């Protein structure tokens, strides 16, 4: 069963084709995806912002799939980038994996992550279709 979310893009705010200003999600089970780093299945941290971002997004998609949901049901993503990382490189890398699934998004610059060498961390909130 597909659950439909509603994107909110008020005329008074900037409209962006990559994200939405808000998402209304119907009552459903909710999945909170914990922060995913750019690590492979062995726990090895990949090199560079592009590789880490792509892998972190793949990891988010893996958790979504394990819960029986997908990017079309994500209502919010948070992306945490280490200070000095080129956000545009990270954005392009994430879009290459994530695709064209508009959601509410927050991007935050941090001084570092819990794991030394991690340049990006991504978490998400999704609804699970019944």
Image: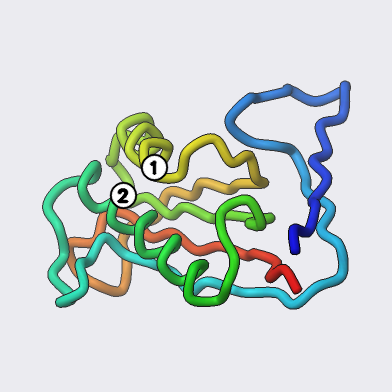
Q: Which mark is residue 107?
A: none
Rendered view: 60 above or below 24: below
Please state if 83 lies on the left or on the right of 76 as rendered: left
Q: Are marks 2 and 1 in contact (CB under 8 Å)?
A: yes
Q: Position of residue 109 (x, y in %)?
A: 43, 48
Q: Which residue is mark 2?
A: 53
Q: Residue at point 73% right, 22% down? A: 14
Please state if 7 lies on the left or on the right of 110 as rendered: right
Q: Residue at point 37% right, 50% down? A: 81
CA gap between label 2 and label 1 equals 6 Å
The tag earlier along the polypeptide, 2 or 1, is: 2
| Secondary structure under the numbered disc 2 in the rendered image | helix
Quarter holding residue 116: bottom left
Please state if 86 lies on the left or on the right of 25 as rendered: left
Q: How many marks?
A: 2
Q: Nearer the viewer, residue 50 or 41?
A: 41
Q: Position of residue 101 (x, y in %)?
A: 58, 41
């Amino acid at each position: 069963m597909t659950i439909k979310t509603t994107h909110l893009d008020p005329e008074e705010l900037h409209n962006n084709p990559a994200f939405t200003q808000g998402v209304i999600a119907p009552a459903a089970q909710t999945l909170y995806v914990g922060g995913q780093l750019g690590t492979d299945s062995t726990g090895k941290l990949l090199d560079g912002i592009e590789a880490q971002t792509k892998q972190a997004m793949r990891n988010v998609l893996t958790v979504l799939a394990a819960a029986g949901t997908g990017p079309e049901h994500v209502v919010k993503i948070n992306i945490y980038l280490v200070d000095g990382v080129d956000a545009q490189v990270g954005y392009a890398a994430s879009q290459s994996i994530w695709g064209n699934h508009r959601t509410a998004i927050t991007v935050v610059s941090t001084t570092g992550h819990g794991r030394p060498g991690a340049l990006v961390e991504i978490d998400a909130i999704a609804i699970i279709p019944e």
